[in-house]
């Protein structure tokens, strides 16, 4: 390799490294300035600015402290990462809005607490089927809805056929505390099977909510793929640990290695379609 080729290769490597580094931004509400470079040493001041600068596949690190914002993830592969659920606290900037909006595929929100909000995370698939989001190591404290999955229907469904029958999101290691509905999956337009997407929960805690999970039609009818709830604990949820408000399921919903304590365990209009594997029930009414 001659000198010119070597210099070109080194220059290309520097550019690629700089581009990769440019996709990571830091936010700090004490030291930050939205006119700053956005590095760890010179962070920006607002979550909105950090995410605005973050490219697809990049990461926005949110520092410790209290934040009132609507953190919108619009680009595939974006990551919103706090400093830990005991350090970073988000709340929605106004009533009826989510603190975190997911409107892209393969995104991650993690390591923070959302509290005192109408919605913690809204996963939106109205016109485009956004899939494979991960909500990890987050606490939802005193939220009317912890994670809200809203799905497409009817006229717009034809726009997204290529991405149908995939998982909308996975909740991993999350806590849903003292709220209304920990997870609320709702079919936009209502009625019938949605033919769209599912969700999964792993190692989650649902405590002292009205409903731990309320599924109002998130079953892909044609694909027969179903929700999966694994290694999760439901304690003292006042109405049901989990309610599946769908009249007919084409497949089965898996509940594996879960614990249920409180007034009522599981409700479904078709209990035969719920697959219970190694689950422990200690409720006044275990299943309905």
Image: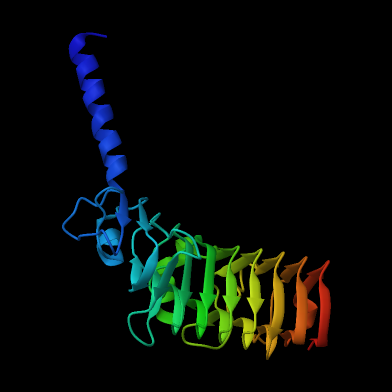
Q: In which quarter of the view is residue 217 placed?
A: bottom right
Instruction: Residue 94: tell me if it is visible.
Output: yes
Q: Nearer the viewer, residue 180 or 270?
A: 180
Q: Nearer the viewer, residue 20 or 68?
A: 68
- Give left or right: position of 170 versus 30: right
Q: Nearer the viewer, residue 254 or 144?
A: 144
Instruction: Residue 196: tell me if it is visible.
Output: no
For image coordinates 54% across by 69% down, the residue present is 197
Quadrant in which the C terminus is drawn: bottom right
Q: Position of residue 108 (x, y in %)?
A: 46, 59
For image coordinates 46% across by 64% down, the residue present is 87
Q: Position of residue 60 (x, y in %)?
A: 35, 56
Q: Residue furthest left?
A: 35
Q: Nearer the viewer, residue 75 or 139?
A: 139
Q: In which quarter of the view is residue 27 placed?
A: bottom left
Q: Position of residue 199 (x, y in %)?
A: 58, 68
- Give left or right: position of 162 versus 268: left
């Amino acid at each position: 390799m001659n000198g010119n080729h070597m210099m070109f290769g080194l220059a290309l490597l520097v550019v690629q490294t700089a581009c990769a580094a440019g996709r990571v931004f830091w936010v700090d509400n004490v030291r930050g300035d939205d006119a700053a470079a956005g590095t760890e040493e010179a962070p920006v001041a607002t979550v909105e600015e950090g995410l605005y600068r973050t490219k697809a596949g990049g990461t926005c690190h949110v520092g410790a402290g209290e934040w009132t914002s609507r953190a919108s993830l619009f680009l595939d592969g974006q990551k919103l990462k706090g400093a830990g659920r005991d350090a970073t606290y988000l709340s929605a900037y106004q009533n009826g809005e989510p603190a975190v909006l997911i409107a892209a595929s393969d995104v991650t929100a993690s390591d923070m607490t959302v509290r005192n909000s109408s919605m913690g995370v809204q996963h939106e698939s109205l016109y485009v089927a956004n899939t494979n989001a991960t909500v990890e190591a987050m606490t939802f404290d005193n939220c009317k809805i912890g994670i809200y999955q809203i799905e497409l229907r009817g006229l717009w469904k034809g726009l997204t056929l290529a991405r149908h029958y995939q998982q909308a999101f996975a909740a991993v290691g999350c806590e849903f505390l003292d709220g209304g509905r920990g997870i609320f999956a709702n079919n936009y337009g209502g009625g019938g099977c949605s033919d769209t997407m599912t969700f999964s929960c792993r190692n989650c805690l649902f405590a002292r909510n009205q409903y731990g999970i309320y599924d109002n039609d998130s079953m892909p009818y044609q694909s027969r793929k179903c929700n999966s709830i694994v290694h999760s604990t439901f304690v003292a949820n006042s109405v049901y640990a989990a309610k599946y408000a769908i009249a007919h399921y084409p497949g089965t919903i898996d509940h594996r290695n879960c614990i249920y304590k409180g007034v009522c365990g599981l409700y479904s209009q078709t209990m035969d379609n719920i697959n219970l594997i190694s689950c422990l029930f200690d409720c006044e009414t275990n299943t309905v």
